[in-house]
Image: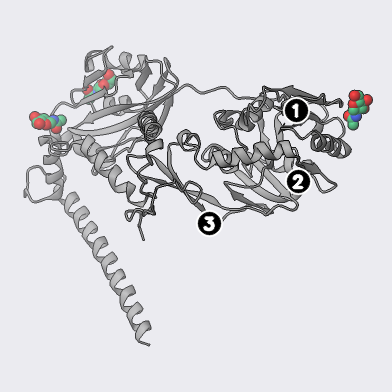
Amino acid sequence: MVLFGRSFFRISYFKLRAVLVIVLILHLVVQFWKCFPQQGVASSCPGQLIRTMYTRGVMSAGINNENIEGNLREQMQIGRLRCNCPEPPDWLRPVNARRINEGNKWELEKNKRREPLSVCNAMSPFNYIGGGITVEPYQTVPIIGLSLHPVIERMLPQLNTDITLKISSLNKLGKPRFSKSFHEMCLSNCLISGQGTTQLSINLKRNISLLNSVLKNNILYSSDNYELDARDKLQITLLNFTADIYVRIRREPLPDLYDPGERNSVIDKVTVITKTFERYDSVDEFVSSIHMFYPNLTIIIADDSEFPQPIKKDHVKHFIMPFREGSFPGRNLALSQVKTKYVIFLDDDMFFTSRTNLEAMLEKLEDPKADMDIVCGRVKHLSELKGFRRIGYSGTQGYCNLGPFVPQNHQVYGYPQCTWGEMFIFFFMAKTAVLRKIGAYPQIVQAAHEEAWIDTIGKAKSAFCSDSVVSHKHYSNSKYLEFRRESHSVLYRDPLALFENNICYWWRRYKFPGIHSFNLYSRQNNLE
Ligand SMILES: *[C@@H]1O[C@H](CO)[C@@H](O)[C@H](O)[C@H]1NC(C)=O
Ligand SMILES: *[C@@H]1O[C@H](CO)[C@@H](O)[C@H](O)[C@H]1NC(C)=O
Ligand SMILES: *[C@@H]1O[C@H](CO)[C@@H](O)[C@H](O)[C@H]1NC(C)=O
């Protein structure tokens, strides 16, 4: 009962507050309209107040938009995942410093392209679109969505001042101008200045219908710089009120299409790639198993064994690489030779079975509603992985891989057998164009699993689906094992894996010798 009483009190208190706000707004509106028709009545009228604000330039005075934006961005960071970086051991210091330096350059590049905060000031006399207007370099776009607020339109004749409109390009990536038809309308009725510069201005005298016309798609913006993806900031000033409109200059890349073939067959749409090292018996079974269930499927094998042996099978392309060239370079080589829209990757000791269903994998990649780039299948005898990565940001030292998390809502809509995630076992089908853009960091020579998945973050949407299965068998021999063991021990202290993604710490994997435990988690990352 006590609890019930309390929540009841809370609800009525909330309602009371809402009602008070509405009453206040109504009061202001009534006052505004009361004051509006006659001029210069009681100076406490809100309408009079607003008019005074516009005419005296109060609305724009003292507002420094740069400061506001920086401040707002800082507030937004409160929810960002933070982490601390450990002091690197001596042997890592030089490469760590180079990483931070390269990372800072990358951050600067990234910031150039970040989403601008289009700050919309209150009491704007006109409607405008803060962001989303896009133009190709050297082309022209109308500044759409401009129109006078109806209240302001009625108020304007009372102002007794000339109406001036200023449009400036602040980042100077292009120039504002008026359309030809507007120039014809204008003639002796208005004064235009700053034509052909980044600061255009027009005096419309007191002609409100002319103001309405100019706002209606007659202000144009012509990009005159070569940019692939940049933003210009157009500042529009009317009645001493200033609004910022972000125009995006974007050279649209053309699509990367692959011909799926006439037959709509898996054979024409899919290529299998793998990388092998000193395991010809395994490769033999690998190829046979694939061709047993999918005859004529193209298989590309990158091989960096010491004494390469020919693989004499139909529909197999065998690429010989220098001895111990490495796992990631091998993947890159094989991927570069793919001619089909989709590509399958699996290790050379995984085998197709009657439960390997490429059609089921293809279905998801081809479903526009699923929007999936990489679909992983199950590998028998290996544990299933799931989850996303928590990536923390340290501020000045780079990022941290804080390990996995599993969000509640990670089911793929329409496919109950599938879940989204950012790391699974390596048996997958992917869109070739997407995988090519991710590539594999060739400096990493070991078969590094987590590193490869970290590379996909933000670049591809991956899911695991249990309806396509391959089997797995450990094929090994003394030579294979010798090099495998060696690469394992290198991996744990290889700064390259950290360098690539500007990561200063890798949960549990990188326990640098000589580093005592430190607090990885920064306290700033709490919004709750
Ligand atoms: C804008 O403000 C200036 C003073 O800063 C004032 O002289 C001018 O009349 C105002 N213009 C309009 C259109 O309100
Ligand atoms: C406003 O400008 C238009 C177009 O030039 C003109 O036809 C109209 O007569 C002008 N109105 C006033 C009130 O000056
Ligand atoms: C496989 O390729 C051979 C020629 O290499 C061809 O005769 C056969 O019809 C193909 N089979 C399929 C299922 O495409």
Tell me which amino acid carries mark 1.
Answer: Ile
How many labels were placed on the picture?
A: 3
Q: Which residue is mark 2?
A: 474
Tell me which amino acid carries mark 3.
Answer: Pro
Report helix, strand or loop for mark 2. Answer: loop
Q: Which residue is mark 1?
A: 300
Q: Which mark is residue 522?
A: none
Q: Earlier in the sequence, mark 2 or mark 3?
A: 3
Q: Nearer the viewer, residue 13 or 70?
A: 70
Spot the residue most to the bottom: 1
Tell me which amino acid carries mark 2.
Answer: His
Mark 1 vs mark 3, CA separation in Å: 36 Å
Q: Earlier in the sequence, mark 1 or mark 3?
A: 1
What residue is rendered at 37% in x and 49% in y?
82
Report helix, strand or loop for mark 3. Answer: loop
Q: Which color scheme does this rendered protein use?
A: one colour
